[in-house]
Image: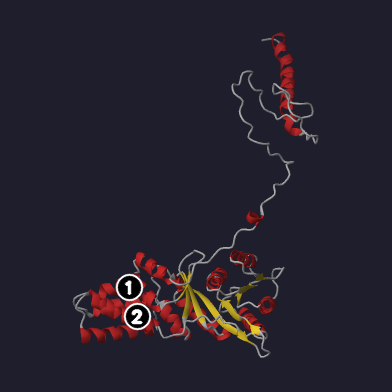
Amino acid sequence: MDFNDLLPYLVGVPVLAAGVAAAVRLRRRPTDTPRTDTRPAETPPAGGAPAAGTAVADRPAAPADTGPAVPDEGPEVTGTTDLLEVPEDLATPPLETPAPTAGRLRRLRERLARSGSPLGTRLLGVLSRDQLTEDDWDELEETLLLADVGAGPTDELIEALRTRVRVEGLRDGEQARAVLREQLLALVDPTLDRTLHTTPTTGEDGARVPAVVLVVGVNGTGKTTTVGKLARVLVADGSSVVLGAADTFRAAAADQLETWGSRVGVPTVRSDRDGADPAAVAFDAVRAGVRDGADVVLVDTAGRLQNKAGLMDELGKITRVITRTAPLSEVLLVLDATTGQNGLNQARVFGEVAGVTGIVLTKLDGTAKGGIVVAVQRELGVPVKLVGLGEGPDDLAPFDPEAFVDGLLQS
C-alpha cells in the first residue's frame, strides 16, 4: 500500500477525534455548569411543555401517547430545598423507663440453667455417684479450684461435704443436690450486708447531702457502662441521680456516660477538655448534686492498673477531694468475672487505696468462673453487691446469694 492509499485514513482520524471531543463536551455540559433559577416556577401550559424560566431536568422526552396521567408524587427535593421543620415530639427522643430491679436476678438463674452451668453440673455429677472414692474427691477439688473458688474455701467445702456424706450418706441425686446447695450457700454467705447505701444524709449545717458512689477498677472491666446501668437501677428505684465523668483520659468516656444519662433524664457533669483534673470534675459533680438536691451522685473514674503507683495515688486524691463536700457512701470495685485469680490481686490493691465497700461482678452469666464470688469476698471481706447479667441496658441486678446458687445448680 502506497502513500496515496493511506491518505483517506490519515485525513479521517482528526475529524473523528474532533467529533468525539464535541460529543463529550455536549454530554458533560449539564453537570459541569449547573444552573440555579431563583425565579418562581410557573404553571406549565397544557400539553406538558415547561414554562419559560423553569429548570428542566436532564431526562428523556416522554412519548407522544402515554396513556392516563400519573399523579404527581410531590415536589422534587434538591440541594436548595429549605430544611424541614421537625416536630418537638420527634426532635427530642422520649426518655426510657428502666425495668424494675425486682426479679432481675431471676434472669441470671434462668441463663445459668440454660447455659448448663458447668460448675454446678460437674459438682452434682460427682456427688451423685454410688460410691465416692478418693479420686472422686480429688475431682471435686479440682472442679472447685478451676471455678476460682480459691484454695481456702475449697478445702472448707470438701471437708464439709465429706462429713455430711460420712454421717448422713447420699441416698439419691436430690439429697446430693440439697447438701451441695446448703454448703455452697454457706460459702457465698447470705449474712453479708449487700444493701447499696444510696440514702441522702444531713450535713453538720443541717443541709441535705446526696449519697456519693465512687466506681473504680482496671481498664476494660466496663466501669463506664456499669455506671450507666447503675444509674438506670437507681432511677427505677425512684432516686434522682447526677453523673460525674471523672474519666478524663479516655476521649469517649464522658460522651458515653452522657449518652447513658440522657436516656433516663440524668444530668452529667463533665469537663470541656480532655486530660482535665479528674478530682476537680468529681468535686464539681458532688457540688452539683448538693445544689440540685439529688439523691445520689455517681462518679466514674479512669481505668488504672493496680501496679501503677501514680494512678493509684490519683485515685486517693479523688477520694480526699470528694470527702471535703460529702462522705463517700459506697466505693464499688468493678471486676470482670472471667479474669479469675487476677481479679483478686486487683481487688486487694484497690481495697487498700480506695476503701472498697462493695464488688460489682460483670460477665457473670453462663460462666464457669462463678467461684470468684466466694474468693473475692474472702479476699476483701466485702460483699458482692451487684452482678452483670449480659449486654442489655437493664442487665445489672442486686446480688441474691440464694438465686445465684440455685442458678448454678439449675434448681
Q: Nearer the viewer, residue 141 or 13?
A: 141
- Give the amino acid at mark 1: Leu
Q: Residue at x 66, y 24 (%)?
A: 60
Image quadrant in which the N terminus is located: top right
Q: Nearer the viewer, residue 393 or 342?
A: 393
Callout 2: SS: helix
Q: Residue at x 74, y 14 (%)?
A: 11
Residue 311, position in %: x, y?
Answer: 62, 78
Circles 2 and 1: CB atoms closer than 8 Å: yes
Residue 204, position in %: x, y?
Answer: 66, 91
Callout 1: SS: helix
- Dividing the picture into quadrants, the one containing residue 353 is bottom right
Residue 66 shown left or right of residue 105 in the figure: right
Residue at numbered disc 1: 409
Q: Residue at x 61, y 58 (%)?
A: 93
Q: Is residue 223 visible?
A: no
- Dividing the picture into quadrants, the one containing residue 259 is bottom right
- Dividing the picture into quadrants, the one containing residue 270 is bottom right
Decide which of tag 2 and tag 1 comes sooner along the chain: 2
Q: Nearer the viewer, residue 103 or 6?
A: 103
Residue 103 shown left or right of residue 10 in the figure: left
Q: From this viewpoint, which residue is outermost toward the bottom?
A: 204
Residue 229, position in %: x, y?
Answer: 54, 69
> Label 1 crowding class (10 Å Cα cut-off): few <14, some 14-19, many 20+?
many
Q: Is residue 256 above or below residue 49?
A: below
- Give the amino acid at mark 2: Leu
Residue at numbered disc 2: 184
Calculate the distance from the C-alpha at mark 2 to the C-alpha at mark 1.
10 Å
